[in-house]
Every structure is written in structure tokens, then in C-alpha cells.
């Protein structure tokens, strides 16, 4: 009778080594700094700790804030290679949480946009204005951050929005921003920028399909409110 083989369990002394703690306890009990050390993968403990300290000393000192970090901001703190590794790990976690999906998610409703972006945007402490670039099948080509503002507003110029759309050959766009207050009710400024972007999109030939405001666990679609013509 054939006996099944099991891989030998890796036994490492706990100590202060995050790898040993993960091998013995699993990833859940590890602190944020330990997870960062493992992802950044410096060759020695001192280098790992220094890199982790550099991250935690920035504005991205929580898992939620790290999920919203830009490559440029992290690269300024820890260098481009480590910034890339950290953002790649975050994206792997997001995809694992989302489950199986198509390579390019298709957007059929405002709810699809909320599901795609609320994972990190609901936790941001400043307004971030993003644009979803869509192909002719309404599949997402790219999500670009075009503006980061203060607690209550983000300055947005149509030039920046459509520069990304033209650069990546988008057939249409959906614009999205968050309200750090958690209340997704559109402001008068939100409606005004929607009108400006819609007019610019009509002129350029890249329509604005929707403007979505993300709050804490909820969202508002300006199209569903009747503010964008179909």
C-alpha cells in the first residue's frame, strides 16, 4: 500500500525573527512591521528593520494607508525596488480577497466600481480622485490617481483626467473620489466637476460614464441620481 508523503514541517526557533514566527504561528499574529520586513526581504535583520522603520515613519503607518499608497511616495521612502515589492504584495492580498476574477474586470454598474475600489478608498484620510480607464467592452485598462487633496476636497482639472485617458487609449472613463467623512453625498463642487468633465469628454470623444463618490461602506452614483445623461 502506498503511503502519502507530507512535506516536513519547517521548525525554526521563534526569537525575534519574523520568518521564524510566521513558520511557527502563521501570518495572522505578526505585527505590521514584521510583515513589511518579510515582504521587503533585506539580506540581514538590520536592513529589514531599517526598511520597515522607513515605511512606518511615513504617512503609511497602517495596513489601510499602505493599501492606498502610491509608488512614488513609497519609492521616496524606501527606494523603487522595495516600493514595488510592497505594492505587489498588497495587490496579491487584494486579489486573494476578491477571489477568482477575469484578467480585466468589466464594469457594468456603479456597484462594480464600488466593489473594485472601496477596499482601500473607504479608509483614506484625504480625498483621492481616481479615473477608471475603460476599453470598448467597459473592461478596466487602468486605474489612475489624478489628484490627492485635503480632508474635504481634491482639486481636479479635466486636463489631468483626460491626459491619462488619451495616453492609454481609453474608450470611456468613470471618475471616482472618496469622502473621508464617510458620507458619500455629492457636494455642489462634485456636481460642478462632473459637468466640466462630461463636457470635456463629449468634446474629446471619450465619454464620462459615471462619477462615483465612495464613503464608508456606501457609495453614490451621480448617474443614478440623474446628474449625467445616458
Image: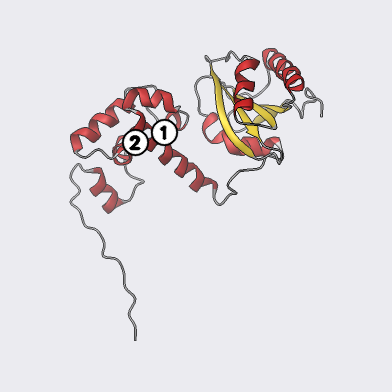
Q: Is residue 11 visible?
A: yes
Residue that badge 1 annotates: 63
Q: Quadrant of residue 92?
A: top left
Q: Is residue 109 above or below residue 6?
A: above
- Tell me, for residue 7, which label it has, or none: none
Please name the residue shown 62% across and 14% down the image: 157
Q: Is residue 60 visible?
A: no
Residue that badge 2 annotates: 32
Nearer to the camera, 166 or 198? 166
Nearer to the camera, 191 or 87? 87
Q: x and y percent of residue 152 in the render?
A: 57, 14
- Label 2: how many residues lie within 10 Å, few (<14), some (14-19) or many (20+)? some
Return the disc, 2 or 1, that comes first in the chain's sequence: 2
Dot 1 lies on which element?
Answer: helix
Q: Give the side of residue 103 with respect to residue 74, left or right.
A: right
Q: Residue furthest bottom?
A: 1
Q: Is residue 199 above or below residue 120?
A: above
Dot 2 lies on which element?
Answer: helix
Q: What is the image's colouring?
A: secondary structure
Please name the residue shown 61% across and 15% down the image: 156
Nearer to the camera, 29 or 118? 118
- Label 1: how many residues lie within 10 Å, few (<14), some (14-19) or many (20+)? some
Q: Quadrant of residue 207?
A: top right
Cα separation between marks 2 and 1: 7 Å
Q: x and y percent of residue 136 in the render?
A: 71, 38
Q: x and y percent of residue 108 in the render?
A: 71, 40
Q: x and y percent of residue 217 in the render?
A: 59, 33
Which image quarter holds the N terminus?
bottom left
Q: Give the side of residue 213 with respect to residue 180, left or right.
A: right
Please name the residue shown 57% across and 15% down the image: 154
The answer to whether the residues at label 2 and label 1 have Cβ atoms under 8 Å apart is yes
Q: Give the side of residue 160 with respect to residue 33, left or right.
A: right
Amino acid at each position: 500500500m502506498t503511503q502519502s508523503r507530507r512535506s516536513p514541517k519547517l521548525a525554526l526557533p521563534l526569537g525575534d525573527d519574523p520568518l521564524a514566527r510566521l513558520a511557527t504561528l502563521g501570518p495572522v499574529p505578526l505585527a505590521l512591521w514584521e510583515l513589511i520586513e518579510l515582504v521587503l526581504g533585506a539580506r540581514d535583520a538590520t536592513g529589514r528593520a531599517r526598511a520597515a522603520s522607513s515605511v512606518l515613519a511615513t504617512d503609511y503607518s497602517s495596513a489601510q494607508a499602505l493599501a492606498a499608497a502610491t509608488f512614488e511616495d513609497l519609492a521616496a521612502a524606501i527606494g523603487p525596488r522595495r516600493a514595488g515589492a510592497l505594492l505587489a504584495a498588497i495587490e496579491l492580498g487584494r486579489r486573494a480577497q476578491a477571489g477568482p476574477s477575469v484578467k480585466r474586470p468589466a464594469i457594468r454598474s456603479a456597484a462594480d466600481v464600488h466593489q473594485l475600489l472601496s477596499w482601500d478608498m473607504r479608509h483614506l484620510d484625504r480625498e483621492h480622485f481616481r479615473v477608471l480607464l475603460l476599453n470598448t467592452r467597459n473592461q478596466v485598462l487602468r486605474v489612475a490617481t489624478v489628484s490627492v487633496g485635503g480632508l474635504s476636497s481634491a482639486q481636479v482639472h479635466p486636463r489631468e483626467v483626460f491626459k491619462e485617458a488619451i495616453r492609454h487609449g481609453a474608450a470611456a472613463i468613470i471618475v471616482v473620489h472618496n469622502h473621508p467623512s464617510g458620507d458619500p453625498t455629492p457636494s455642489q463642487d462634485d456636481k460642478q466637476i462632473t459637468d466640466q468633465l462630461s463636457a470635456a469628454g463629449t468634446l474629446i470623444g471619450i465619454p464620462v460614464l459615471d462619477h462615483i463618490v465612495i464613503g464608508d461602506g456606501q457609495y453614490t452614483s451621480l448617474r443614478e441620481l440623474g446628474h449625467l445623461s445616458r
